[in-house]
Amino acid sequence: MNPHRHAIEKLYAHLHSSAQGLSQTEALKRRAKYGANQIEKITGQPFIVRLLREFTHFFALILWLAAALAFVAEWREPGQGMAMLGYAVLGVIVVNGLFSFWQEYRAEKALVALRNLLPHHTTALRDGMTVQLLVAELVPGDVVLLAAGDDVPADCRLIEAFGVRVNTANLTGESKPKARAVSAESEELAALRRDILHAGTSLISGEAKAMVYATGMHTEFGNIARLTQILREPPSPLQKEIARLSRWIALFAIVLGAVFFLIGHLIGLSFWSNLVFTIGIIVANVPEGLLPTVTLSLAMATQRMAKKNALVRHLPAVETLGAASVICSDKTGTLT
């Protein structure tokens, strides 16, 4: 049943509840059925897998190979400075990998921030009496009592409302409070209905009595939390270009090394001397500074944007936004 399209009496019947709320026994049964009213963490890739991914992409593999070749050259002909070059390349790989992983880790903190937007306690009706409950204990069919300053603990349908105005900024980005009232409407979009309160919003003024019809990850707020965890952005134009450049660099370095190895063989160089020289040619053609230069450039750009109140969660978004020719925003300035 869509709770937005029917009169409140039909919602009572569908949820097997009333304006007096649920009994404690029924609430416990529904808690077992629907789970806790909280934002859940969707199981993703393990920590170690996400960390290793930063050290195993194509360009990183090229750098690993360059470092290995440098150490091989140092082993064959010590004192040529190839070991120092190898350690420098390893340092680039480690620093860039850790920095990129840190940026992704910070982005995942958005889920923690979403969890903190939900209140910890709320007032509800159980067995016809007013009780204080943990928000996690709310279930569909519960009736909650809200006053000015309270955060809405779940998606609710208004039963009674007196001068209610709601701050919906956390959900819609709208900066001005919206009036809410008990009224029959034909509007099907829940976000636009005046008789709906959403989890994650808060009462600026007034008092309300409302029936919970969705909890936890089934709320609109929970859906946003789910999207922040499961959506994976496609590679940005810059990432695609770096991948393409990496393939060309690898091909060019190998071909050039093979050519010089052949030349050395023709002019009579010994095998190992020729091989060390070839390794030097290959390593010299790998731009070890490319990855940290790109990463630090994007990081500096995010800092400059932050000073202008533009927050960027993912570094590649800086370059992608810079490639935009048209930006659509609503009257509040929220990018849509």
Image (cartoon, helix red, strand yellow):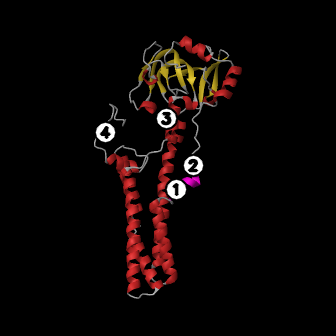
Q: Earlier in the sequence, mark 1 or mark 4?
A: 1
CA distance separating discs 1 and 3: 26 Å
**Which residue in the structure is indicated by mark 4?**
327
Q: Are marks 2 and 1 in contact (CB under 8 Å)?
A: yes
Q: Which residues are magenta?
A: 47-54
Residue 270 located left or right of residue 304: right
Q: Looking at the picture, which amino acid does disc 1 mark?
A: Arg
Q: Looking at the picture, which amino acid does disc 4 mark?
A: Ile
Helix or strand or loop: what does disc 1 sit on?
Answer: helix
CA distance separating discs 4 and 3: 22 Å
* Viewer-side residue, 277 vs 182: 277
Name of the residue lying farthest toward the left: 325
**Which residue in the structure is indicated by mark 1?**
53
**x%, y% of residue 172?**
42, 30
Helix or strand or loop: what does disc 2 sit on?
Answer: loop
Residue 299 drawn above or below residue 141? below
Q: Main secondary structure of the magenta part?
A: helix
**Which residue in the structure is indicated by mark 2?**
45
Q: Looking at the picture, which amino acid does disc 2 mark?
A: Gln
**Which residue in the structure is indicated by mark 3?**
224
